[in-house]
Amino acid sequence: VTPSNASKLLARIGSGTKRIEVRTSPAGIEPYLHDEAVRSSDPAAAVLFPRSTEEVSRILKLASRFRVPVVPRGAGSGVAGSAVPGKGWIVLSLERMNRILAVDERDAVAVVEPGAITGEIRKAVEAKGLFYPPVPGSVDLCTIGGNVATNAGGLSAVKYGVTRPYVLGLEAVLAGGEVIQTGGRYLKHSTGYDLTQLIVGSEGTLAVITKIVLRLLPLPTERMTLLAPFPSLEDLTGAVLAILAERIVPPTLELVPRGAVRSVLARNPDISFPFPESEASLLIEVDGADLPSVERDVARLAPILERCGSPDPLVAFSPSQRERLWSLRKGIRDSIVACGPYVEADSVVPRSQLPELVRAGDACGARHGLETISYGHAGDGNLHTYFLKGTLLERSWKSASKKVLREYYERTVRLGGTISGEHGIGSLKRPYLPIALSGGEIQLMRGIKKAFDPYNLLNPGKLLP
Ligand SMILES: Cc1cc2nc3c(=O)[nH]c(=O)nc-3n(C[C@H](O)[C@H](O)[C@H](O)COP(=O)(O)OP(=O)(O)OC[C@H]3O[C@@H](n4cnc5c(N)ncnc54)[C@H](O)[C@@H]3O)c2cc1C
C-alpha cells in the first residue's frame, strides 16, 4: 500500500454533501491501532465512522478502486490481533452503527446493527421476556458485529451454544461495495450454500457485516450459582461429565484452578474466595423458567458433586451472593495480563481431555522456563492458557514464546482438539493454522476468500497463513 492510495480514497470520501466522519491525526488513530492482545506500530491511514450501509458500501467501492486494505472493527476487545490494521490501511469502525432496529416478539428475533454492544442487546430483549444467550466475558464492552465475526463463545455455551446458531441472517457489504442479504427472519432453510454461516467467524476477511438478524429464546427468569472445590482436576472433570451424563445441562461450568485464584488474590486483596487452597474449583450456573425447576436441578447436583469429591459446595441464590461467587472468576484475565508480557492460547479439546490439556500447558511452559496459568470453560473443553515471560530475558522470550505455542498447539491437536475455541485466529495464531487444518482445507479457504475478495483487501494477512 502506498500512502497515496489511501489519500485518493480519503479525498473522494471527503467530497460530496454527506460527509463520513474521518480521523487521520495520530492521536485520533492511536486507539484503533490495537486490540486487547496486539499493538501495531504501523500507522493506519485513517479511521472512518460510517453511519449507514450505503456509507460502508461507498467506502468499500473506493477502497477497491484504489486498492486500499480495510479492517472492519467493533470494540477492539478481540485477543487475536484480528482488528489491528497494517500501515496505510483504513480502519472501518462500525461503532456509530449501533442501533437495535427491532425486537420482534412474535417471531422471536432481533434485528441489530453491528456496532450495538452485546450486553445492551441482551437487556433490550430481556425487557420483552426474550433471551439472547451468548455471553462472552466482555459482554458489556464487545459489539455484536465482533461477536458474529469471531463466532464468540463465552460463559453459557454448555447449554446454549456459541454465537453461530443465533445468527439467522445478515446484511453484509462485499469488498467491491455490493450489498448482499443472507438468510432472514426464519429458523431454518435449505436453500443453497449457507453464506450467513460462512461469514460468521470470518474475522472481517470476507465481508463487512452491516445488519444482523438474531434468534431469541424465551427468557429463563430464575438462576442459581454454585461453587464447588475439588481435590484434583480429574475429579472436577469427572463431575462435569457426570453432571451432563445425568442430563442436567447447566449454561455454565467454569474451571477456576488454584494458579488462577492465586494470581487474582495476589493483586486484589479485596476479593475473597472461599476455597483458595483447593486444586481447582467449578463454578456452576443453573437456570430455568421457574424456581422449582432450578431448585430441583441444584438438589440433583449435590449428590453428583459429593460422589465426585466435592461434598460441600457453596450455593448462591440472590444476585449479590451470586455476584460474590463470580467476582474472582471475572478478575482472572485482568490479573494475569497485569503480570507483564505473555502469550495466550485458546485451545479446545473434547471435554474429557481437559486435565490432559492443562497438564500439557504446564509441561510446555516449564520446558521453556515460563510460568503457566490456565482457566476456562470446563463444560466446553475450552481452556485459556497464559504463558508468562516473568524474568526471562527479552531475547530468550522471543523464541520461547513462539516455541511454547507451537508445542502446545501440537499437543492440543493430538488430544483431538483445535487451536481456537472462541477467540479466532487473527494474526497471532495464523502461523499455527497448519497444525490444525490440512493443506487441502487451507487451500479451499483461500479459494473462498478469493471468491469474496478477489483483490485481498478485506483484513488481508489475517486468519489464513
Ligand atoms: C475481558 C475479556 C473477556 C473476553 N471474554 C470472551 C469470551 O468469553 N468469549 C469470547 O469468545 N471472546 C471473549 N473475549 C474476546 C472478544 O471480546 C471477542 O472476540 C469479541 O467477539 C470481539 O468483539 P469486538 O466488538 O471487540 O470486535 P473487534 O475486536 O473489534 O473485532 C474482532 C474481529 O471481528 C471483525 N469485525 C468486527 N466488526 C465487524 C463487522 N461489522 N463486520 C465484519 N467483521 C467485523 C474484526 O475485523 C476482527 O476481525 C474477551 C475479551 C476480553 C478483553
Image (cartoon, rainbow, N blue to C red):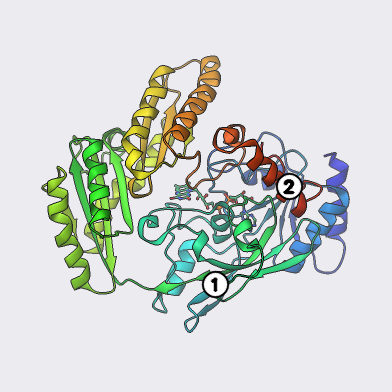
Is residue 33 rendered to the left or right of residue 388? right
What distance separates the C-alpha of mark 1 from that of mark 2?
27 Å
Residue 417 picture location, percent across and down:
45, 40
Q: Residue at x 82, y 39 (%)?
A: 1
In the image, what residue type sits under mark 2?
Gly
Secondary structure of residue under mark 1? loop
Which image quadrant is residue 3 in?
top right
Q: Residue at x 16, y 60 (%)?
A: 300
Tell me the crowding category of disc 2: few under 14, some 14 to 19, or many 20 or more residues within 10 angstroms, Cα based: few
Residue 365 picture location, percent across and down:
41, 23
Which image quadrant is residue 112 in?
bottom right
Q: Which residue is mark 2?
A: 447
170 w.r.t. 406: above or below: below
Mark 1 or mark 2: name the one nearer the start of the chain.
1
Tell me the crowding category of disc 1: few under 14, some 14 to 19, or many 20 or more residues within 10 angstroms, Cα based: few
Q: Quadrant of the C terminus?
A: top right
Q: In the image shown, does 125 or 445 lie closer to the viewer? A: 445
Which image quadrant is residue 250 in?
bottom left
Residue 104 picture location, percent across and down:
51, 81
Is residue 196 rendered to the left or right of residue 61? left
Q: Which residue is mark 1?
A: 188
Residue 168 picture location, percent across and down:
56, 69
Answer yes or no: is residue 50 visible.
yes
In the image, what residue type sits under mark 1?
Lys
